[in-house]
Image (tube, helix red, strand yellow):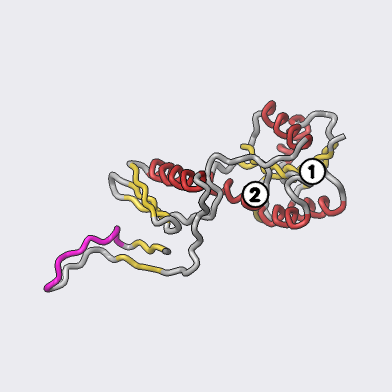
Amino acid sequence: MPSVLYIEDSRTFQRLMTKYLPDEYSLTIVDNLTAGWEAVQSSKFDLVISDFMFPQGDAFELIFQVRHRLSPQQLPIIVLTSVADRFLISKLFVAGVNATISKPPNVPDFRALTARMIEDPWVQRPDFPCEDAHLITWGTADEYTVFCPNLNFFTRGNTAQAALDAMQSRIRQHTLSGEKIPVITTPKQTLYFSQIELPGHPPSSPPPAGHTFAD
């Protein structure tokens, strides 16, 4: 019988999980991250399902603790999250989760995911980059810009999301070519001021005023 650990502080979702999972699964429910880690250490589970946000903090520390001891194949982790932030989700994959799914989940999809994860643990491939790329954004009345100092690359769009999507596409192309995201090894702060015309000097055309770039 597959053994599943569910870490969730919401009583409502605790009750729902008993409906989400098939009856033949052995389900253990704890309501905080500390109890979750203690359960992992004391019992053998085939799968851990965890919420992301708790009163005591987020689930990153628990994920790090589990991964320090057990690989994604030895103990798969699925994180349920209502946060629709693709960069946050990418950090979850970097931390060591096998898959993420939105909260509340689509029950048939959720059951298929958990069954497959228990039978043959695998790591879901996110459709966006997971590398630690730094992004800086700014906007004007009619244009938004995203700058990635790791790649020294700019993207622009008429909305903030359009500029961000273009940057994610650019980073994805870079990683699909087999190249790593360059690491910024020597942090440097450059402060750009608004254009100032000095006597005897032609006016310059610096980047937008008041933005600090790390390069």
Taking the spot 34% from the left edge, 43% from the top edge, the residue there is 157
Q: How far is disc 2 from disc 1 in space, using C-alphas? A: 17 Å
* Residue type pointed to by label 2: Met
Where residue 214 appears, x then y in whole percent? Answer: 42, 64
Q: How many marks?
A: 2
Give the residue furthest to the left: 200
Q: Nearer the viewer, mark 2 or mark 1?
A: 1
Taking the spot 47% from the left edge, 69% from the top edge, the residue there is 186
Q: For residue 136, what is the image quadrant?
A: bottom left
Q: Is residue 142 above or below residue 213?
A: above
Q: Which residues are magenta?
A: 200-209
Task: From the viewer's side, name the closer residue of 179 and 141.
Answer: 179
Where residue 200 appears, x then y in whole percent? Answer: 12, 73
- On the rendered image, what quadrant is the N terminus found in? top right
Q: Is residue 12 above or below residue 134?
A: above
Does the magenta stretch mainly form a helix, a strand or a loop? loop
Q: Which residue is mark 1?
A: 5
Task: Give the mark, 2 or 1, whose residue is nearer the N terminus.
Answer: 1
Residues packed near mark 2 inside 10 Å, few (<14), some (14 to 19) or many (20 plus): some
